[in-house]
Image (tube, rainbow, N blue to C red):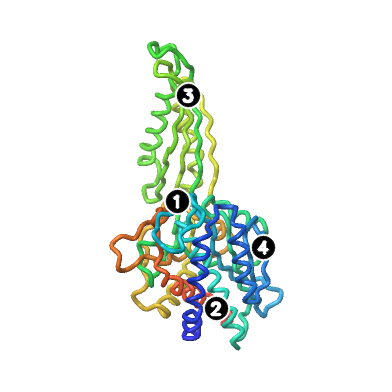
Amino acid sequence: MLPTIQKLARKLTPRLVEIRRHIHAHPELSGQEYKTAAYVSGVLSSYGYHVQEMVGKTGVVAELKGKNSPDDNVLAIRADMDALPILEKADIPFASKSPGIMHACGHDVHTTVGLGAAMLLSELTEAGDRPFPSTTRFLFQPAEETAQGAKWMIADGVMQDVAAILGLHTFPSIPAGNIGLRQGALTAAADDLEIVITGESGHGARPHEAIDAIWIAAQVITQLQQSISRTINPLHPAVITIGQIAGGRAPNVIADQVRLTGTVRSLHADTHALLPDWIARIAKDICALHGATCTVNYTRGCTSVLNDIDLTNLVATCATEALGNDRIQWIPDASMGAEDFANFTDIAPGTMFRLGVGFPERNVNHPLHHSQFEVDESALTTGVITMAYSACRYWQSKEKE
Ligand code: NI
């Protein structure tokens, strides 16, 4: 089976490069992936797929039916499609034709690998190999960058009967031809925080007659950062970043209100669960101590991507056989970044691998979200082989059960 997959992937490669370059040149922002969705849908249809469009707003779903019916053991493969509000500065012939919008997070590669896997698996089953036992469902997701798309698609039922899900993300610091894997937490839970502190204004010369919201806000920020080190389990990391602070009207007027907004990251479910009350208590206690009041709005974003051990090992086995022994990097630390693939792994076991897209010969590979981010396109073949072979081996393991 593996040699056939490798042969098919090599045959598909020129077309994959073409697809990726088309998507790269025509990036669309989160929730506006209309042309990308239509293009994806066209490619899938040309391979005989029955395609559902407008799933989760601008998402696309296609299924490779298995022989089981009813089918409650679906394998999902997820690829995100959205781009970022960045002006591309990479010097490439297929650079963005939409000024100010760029595929700087490699979602053009994810979409192409998802399509490549769909094309390859369809050819493989047509080429005389028996159908898989159950359905393989391809999810082309919008709006990952705003952490909305996975929720939209789930609300439209894409996780129904899904028993396992596979995903990928490009990674420029891993050379093309290699993949990165991690069991357990891959990314962090990310929540939004807003704290509004209300004091009382007064003359800057007579602080004792006022309640200085700026001074109190400074204490709230400092206390939050100090308390992390004393009251949160140091082995269960938490990051609170206040990224915006606004308040005050004039240099000689004591501010009556300050608004802080920030992001809160954590890796473990226990810390994730306690953070909203923990933050609110610290903020409210400090405000009360100084006669101010505060409101704390804590909004849950996405949870941590938890890579299932068995599925991660399955991808590791497949990548080792298909790419070579030395082509897997086990990722030592989780990232405090976020990824809404977590919404899927909250529902079914899944794993996301990192697809190396770095140019091995270059000293500098610009990071994700950089205006000069570039991809070594040989990674497309690596991604498709890894994804398609993992799906095949998954189905093989199900047939044995
Ligand atoms: Ni991304």
Give percent across and percent down for residue 83: 51, 55
Residue 82 lies in quadrant: bottom right
Which residue sits at x=50%, y=33%? 195
Task: Tell me the element at label 2.
Answer: helix
Task: Tell me the element at label 1.
Answer: loop
* Cα distance between the residues tagged 1 and 2: 34 Å
Which numbered disc covers residue 120?
2
Give percent across and percent down for residue 236: 40, 50
Q: Which of marks 2 and 4 is nearer the N terminus?
A: 4
Which numbered disc covers residue 288?
3
Q: From this viewpoint, is residue 150 visible?
A: no
Task: Tell me the element at label 3.
Answer: helix
Give percent across and percent down for residue 270: 48, 49
Q: Name the residue under label 4.
A: 53
CA neighbours of label 2 inside 10 A, class few (<14), some (14 to 19), many (20+):
many
Q: Earlier in the sequence, mark 1 or mark 2?
A: 1
Q: Quadrant of the C terminus?
A: bottom right
Q: Which of marks 3 and 1 is nearer the N terminus?
A: 1
Cβ atoms at labels 1 and 2 below 8 Å apart: no
Q: Mark 1 points at which residue?
A: 87
* Cα distance between the residues tagged 2 and 4: 21 Å
Hey, what amino acid is under mark 4? Glu
